[in-house]
Every structure is written in C-alpha cells, then in structure tokens.
Image: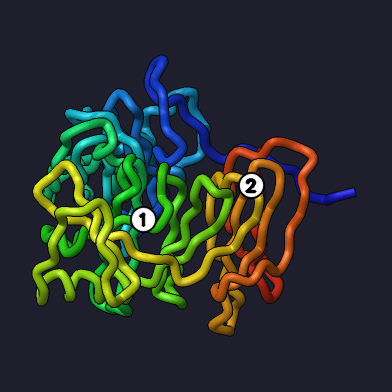
Amino acid sequence: MSLFKLKDWWSTTLGHREQFSGGGLAAGIIDNSGKPRIVSGSLQGWLRVHNPLMPNRTPDSTKSLLLEVRLDAPIYQLKVGRAHAIAVLHPSKLRVCTCSARTNQGSSIETSHLELTAQYIHDFEVTNIGTHAFSMCLGSFGGSTDREMILVQHMDGHVTIYDYDVEILCHCFQDCLAPGPIEYVQSADAFVTSNVAMSIACYKFQALAHSTNQDKSASLQTSGTLIEAKDKCVVLPCNSNKTRRVVTADWICNVGELILSFGIAHVRMTSICQIVALGEHTLFIVSVDGVLQASKLMDFHPTSLCICPTFGIEAWPRVLE
C-alpha cells in the first residue's frame, strides 16, 4: 500500500468546443521570468499560455492564464525552443514567436500577463493539398551549439529545414508516400521517421546537407521521372519551381506496425540514447544504429508516449492510454 496519494495540482478548460491536434500542447520556459509555462494551440487558431505553478485554490482558473490570442490560421503543432521561443506550425506557414513577461502596476503577482512578438514567418509554397505542413521537429542540427534549426515535414513527404529566417534545404525521404511522426536524435545527428511500409527509417543530417551542396555545385537534368546520382540520391521533379532530391536512409528497421509517436530516452551519466517507438499495439526500443533491442506487446490501444526521467540510472518511457 502506498503512503502517497495522487492529487491534481492544476487544471483548466481550454475554450468552448475547440478542437486540438496531437501536437497542440507544449511546455517549457518561454519568457524572461525563467519559470515553466504550458502552451496550447487549437485548430481554431487560439494560442494560450498558462502558469501551472498556481494551484487551483479558487474556482477562478483564469488567474493562471497569461496569454490568449487568436492567430490567423489553425495550429497543428507547437514546440518550445532552447532560446525561449515558440515555434507554431500552421497548414501553410511556420511562425516563430517570443514572449515577454509583464506586470501590472500595483499587482502582487510576479507576472500578470505576457506579450507575444512574432520574430519571423515562413510562408510555404502551397500548390495543392500535398504541400501543406504535417509535422515538425527542432534541434541543433549538424552539431551546432549556438542555435536550433527547425525541420518541417509536409503532406507529400518532402521536408524543409529552416535556420532562423533562411530556408537552407528541401528534400524528400526515400519511399515516403505519406508523412509520419518524426524526431531528431542529437547523439547521432539524424532524423528518425516511419513510413507506410511499417518500418522505422533514419536519415543523417550530413546526407541532406551533402545532397544540397551537390545541387549547388552541379546542374542536374530533370527531364525524366527519376535520375540517379553518385551520392545515392535521385532527382524528383515537383509541382513547384524547386527540385527536391530523394535521399536514401542510413538504416531501416522493419517493425511490422505503423508508428504513432517517437521518443528519445537518454541514459544518465553516459552518452547512450535509445529510440522509443510507439506502435499501434507494441512498444519498440531501437538503438541509434537501427538494431531492435526490445519490444513490449500491450493489451490496450495507446495514443501517446512520454519519456520521463526516473530516480534510477536510466530514463524509461511511459505510455499513455
């Protein structure tokens, strides 16, 4: 019997009859106060920031609401960056914003509200439904230590990487007929994603960058359907004026299930990390080299995955039903 009792610390209701995507919730430090905030975004375009450190001692839960603003497009996904910035993914644009903490004169609350400032906006070249955005991930691609980049995956499978306000590359993953979940692995400097072949694929960032450099140094003909190149890439004509190159995977691990979500588990005091993939019925543990290390068949239908650090040596995944 446990001596502890689980108790709700904070809760709130988000809007009225609003709808949310699976990536419409994020948490982290987003302002100059240095305290964690909860950021939510709905498909109706409402962006809200709450202070979860204020327990619900009164029925008025609006006191924890620090920001509520309606943007001009549905919000697909939210990410909180290392530089206290919020990346907001819309169907046809990527918006990067920052927040500043403000306090009303005479108020006893340390932070009474936040002010949202748009730093830059990337408008996608939307020609059909396939060029709409699907998901994104961020990280220090290429081993950078002073900044984070953002990768956006589109409905037709091609990906675009942005470095601040500059688009640095645009490519397609191998055998990507439909988009799937995607995550960045810092230790391997690579991206892991899934495809319709029920496999997990890994793509090195250096392979994407090398393919971009060859595009700049050589003019390739695109009259055919597919043209083979020396770096195991092919040129694929697309509807836009840009030429996207299909990059082959560094490794592929066949798991036999569609993947719902990815997570990266780090082992404390070591440089070892593992890729945690949540399938429709099974939880998979894959090494950064593409070796399936463990699998666990679940007797329920999972919906999401969260990596939680433990008090022991390792960080173990937690599956939410």
Which is more toward the observer, 206 or 89?
Answer: 206
Can residue 249 be seen in this snapshot? yes
Mark 1 burial class by Cα count in 10 Å: few <14, some 14-19, many 20+:
some
Where disc 1 sits, the SS reads strand
Number of numbered discs visible in the structure rendering: 2
Q: Residue at x 52, y 37 (%)?
A: 10
Which amino acid does the dot numbered 1 rest on?
Cys
* Residue 130 location (% of width, % of height): 28, 36
Residue under pointer 2: 257
Task: Residue under label 1, please give it.
Answer: 137
Q: Is residue 49 above or below residue 16?
A: below
Left or right of 180 in this view: 87: left
Quadrant in the picture for residue 103: top left
Residue at coordinates 68% horizontally, 53% vertically from top-left?
Answer: 283
Asked if residue 194 is positioned above or below residue 247 in the image, the reply reads above
- Quadrant containing the C terminus is top right
In three-dimensional space, the C-alpha distance between marks 2 and 1, rounded to whole angstroms, equals 22 Å
* Residue 76 x, y percent position in the rendering: 34, 36
Q: Which sits in the foreground, 297 or 78?
A: 297
Q: Residue 167: x, y in percent?
A: 15, 59
Looking at the picture, which amino acid does disc 2 mark? Glu
Label 2 or label 1, whichever lies nearer to me, is: 2
